Image (spheres, helix red, strand yellow):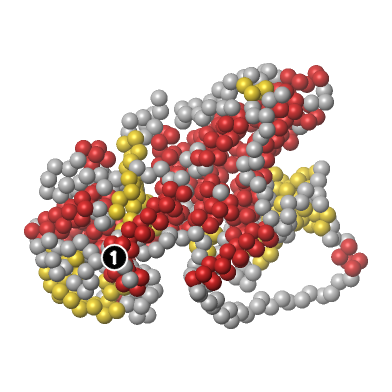
Amino acid sequence: MNKHSGENFYMTTAIAYASGKPHIGNTYEIVLADSIARFRRMQGYNVRFQTGTDEHGQKIEIKAQEKGVTPKQYVDEVAVEIKRIWDLMNTSYDKFIRTTDADHEAQVQKIFKMLYEKGDIYKDKYEGWYCTPCESFWTESQLVDGKCPDCGRDVTKASEEAYFFRMSKYAQQLIDHINTHPEFIQPVSRKNEMMNNFLLPGLQDLCVSRTSFTWGIPVDFDPRHVVYVWLDALTNYTTGLGYNCGGESSEMYKQFWPADLHLIGKDIIRFHTIYWPIFLMALGEPLPKQVFGHPWLIQADGKMSKSKGNVIYADDLVEMFGVDAVRYFVLHEMPFENDGVISWELMVERMNSDLANTLGNLVNRTISMSNKYFEGVVADKGAYEEVDADLKAVVTGTAQKVEDKMKDLHVADAITEIFTLFKRCNKYIDETTPWVLAKDEAKQDRLSTVLYNLVESIAIGASLLKPFMPETTDRILAQLNAKERGYEEVDTFGLYESGSKVTEKPEILFARLDMKEVLEKVEAKRAAAMAEAGVQEEAPAEEEDAIHVELKDEIGIEDFGKMQFAVGEIVDCQEAPKSKKLLVSQVKIGDQTRQIVSGIKKWYKPAEMIGKKVMVLINLKPAKLAGILSEGMILCAEDAEGNVCLMTPEKDMPSGSEIG
């Protein structure tokens, strides 16, 4: 039985604002949440996972007017589209709440009235600045260059009768809670931002109703007012469980509240770590255990814009790459704290290198060799050698590493650990050379054992991959004729039943893609979408000043001929001891492997380097850097800001290929 069996775990995403179709940056959050929920279920937790849509506010009222429909008709259409995208991405939420749900609206009215009767809400007049996209009020001093400090958009002068919440009444209580619960706001940088920029300078009372528009939940005792959209939206986390303000809440609420995790974007951290906990304090309810403000997934070439036709949507990516490839990319490419970058080019690169090569090719080779040499029968003959022990140590140690990373929500690092397992399997094939063993009749038991070790290792890795790429896990295990491992079994080697038979014809898990063909399809789709929408392309922006290239002394062809360049494959990479800048790579160049030291630690993690094909200067005189021998140079490009990237071949070329 799993050690967490029977423990409850309640987690939520922010509810998506129903103003339009979510782009891939919005979709990232639900995929991230799903991977966490699935992993917790694997560990044995009783998980409750909630998401949904935020459907009130002035912005939606305006959009509905522009479209000539009622606000309810507008959000009904958008909510269906959001739910379709969430389902397309194979997310395993338990409840999809809408803030137009009747039971939610009734509870919001009760909450507002209770807080009013308690004296925490009072009526006054509001004068200040309002940002419609953010649904936020600001004082003159809070504006940045006269614009909204959150989104940078224009604000409008607002003056109207409104109800206010006494935020300052609970400020010290919240400060004390944050100081005594260091895990409450994560990452730590978000906590420091909230404390230093909002709480410690002193909280102002919050406007919690509006009269200038009507699309919202009416204040039942003063129906000219509608409830401020954030007071309405935030309460979904409790109303979705059956919270009953001033009455008997449901058994589900008693079972799962307080939430274990609110997963939200960093742009709405203030609402979730200041407003929401203070509302709960006023209601006498426990605070959530943790609020995690994840970074953004941004476009490589700048902000997504419909006028540019460069908005990337999940369904377009899925059409090109498949669901699990998209899940892999958005989860693997997002750092813990800093923004991640997405582009069609990066997707193709990851598809070809990580998914088609590292994983897909491994599974295909293993199954093909099992069929070629033993008619698909995989048997452990007990013919072990020393190299097997290292493989088993990596494989059986991966589960704990993944658990350690997931405990702190380092999801990208957890996936990297699993792919390190797959890379170790590929290295094991190179070490054991099954095709050589097959030529020696006396080595048949050894060959069988090698293939058994590979199948068992892949089965364990595939089981660990389930929370992140669920369909891929099922496809791999079906081809191996292997059972999915329970969490208590993923650190045990040898459970694959000896004598089992793999599939006769391995399927291609991930097909390699041609970059040029993909980009041509993307451009055609973009042009068609803009034409259908009647949108003209923006005039190209003025080009930025080009980098000035300072030319060195000219050389002749005979000088160039002295330099020998080749394609190298990085088979291992480690940080250089006692160095903040250096990585030490083992680079396979044809039939030899060289050690090369590079000052690129700022831009690449060791795990990212492994498996990359790079351009190498191989006849450079060996030298010692930080006391470590370097036998060549890995070539990189550097821009005007000092950013560095590796020089890699456009197509997959074998290591040792000459460059000239």
Residue 200 sits in quarter:
bottom left
Q: Is residue 186 visible?
A: no
Judging depth in this view, the residue of 275 and 522 nearest the camera is: 522
Left/right of residue 651 with respect to residue 190 in the rendered view:
right
Tally the marks: 1
Left/right of residue 274 with respect to residue 93 in the rendered view:
left
Residue located at (58% from left, 20% from top): 497
Q: Is residue 110 visible?
A: yes
Q: Amino acid at mark 1?
A: Pro
446 over 622 or under it: above or below: above
Which quadrant would the C terminus be assigned to in this image? bottom right
* Whole-percent x, y for residue 21 in the image: 42, 61
Left/right of residue 246 with respect to residue 477 in the rendered view:
left
Residue located at (43% from left, 40% from top): 38
The residue carrying mark 1 is 71
Residue located at (89% from left, 68% from top): 557
* Whole-percent x, y for residue 549 in the image: 71, 76
466 over 64 or under it: above or below: above
Judging depth in this view, the residue of 264 and 220 nearest the camera is: 220
Residue located at (61% from left, 66% from top): 523
* Whole-percent x, y for residue 470 in the image: 50, 40
588 over 229 or under it: above or below: above
Which quadrant would the N terminus be assigned to in this image? top left
